[in-house]
Amino acid sequence: MSTVEVAPAVIDLAETTIRELNSRLHAAEDGEGFRVLHPAGRHSVAAGLDSAIDVEIDGHVGYYCAGMSASASLRIHGNAGPGLAENLMSGRVEVTGSASQYAGATAHGGLIAIHGDASSRCGISLKGADVVVQGSIGHMGAFMAQSGRLVVCGDVGEALGDSLYEARLYVRGNVASLGADCIEKELRDEHAAELAELLAAAGFDAEPGDFRRYGSARTLYNFHADRVD
């Protein structure tokens, strides 16, 4: 039996408020699809989603797009402002352009794929999500990242992985400097396999063997009384 495809519902932000958009997306049921037109850099587009819906956004978005969302699949055809997918719980967020500061901050789960570059503090305080960047990222990437994976196909700015916990970092390009307690580690077969899966999930073509792996030296984990003045 053939399946009848249902065209996504179109919501034009030139005629609809952000509150109305998000209310409609929050009320949607699993499997529904939406196409959002004319976002024009507006903030909090598609924030707080909690069902398995597909959302295509045609244009640039501002602060906190897809923040605190779960289960949904979003594709942004443009650039994203600060706080992209902040505190994402699950699902997928894809940006065809570049992302500003704090992309994926505190994200607990899901995949964030950025086709362009990401600015400073990408993956800050990451808590389990995967962030894959096809371009380069700015300084303080993965600062205090606790778990999850950050993959950067381009270069990385200063202080990568400062005060890192157990997140895994993979970089193909140059690293300006490593942050406190972040060290380069051996890229073993299991890491190459993991990296290949992440690149495939993001839709990026790169050779895992070209990457280097970074992680925590674990010297900042525990409180030591003898370090107190």
Image (cartoon, rainbow, N blue to C red):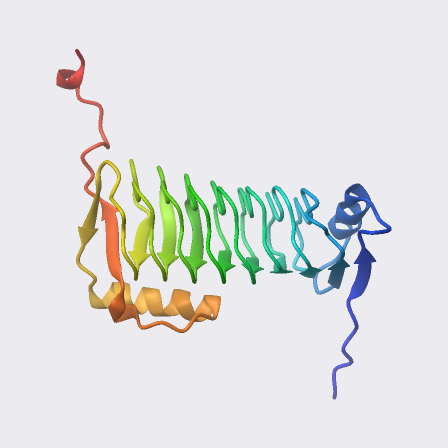
The image shows residue 79 at horizontal and vertical percentages of: 59, 54
Quadrant in the picture for residue 92: bottom right
Q: Is residue 4 left or right of residue 99?
A: right
The image shows residue 189 at horizontal and vertical percentages of: 22, 68
Residue 142 versus residue 201 in the image, above or below = above
For the point 42% across and 40% down, the residue is 124
For the point 53% across and 42% down, the residue is 87
The quadrant of the picture occupied by the C terminus is: top left
The image shows residue 136 at horizontal and vertical percentages of: 40, 56
Residue 115 versus residue 176 in the image, above or below = below
Quadrant in the picture for residue 57: bottom right
**Nearer to me, 218 or 169:** 169
**Nearer to me, 189 or 1:** 189
In the orientation shown, which residue stands out farthest toward the right?
15
For the point 75% across and 62% down, the residue is 34
**Nearer to me, 216 or 98:** 98
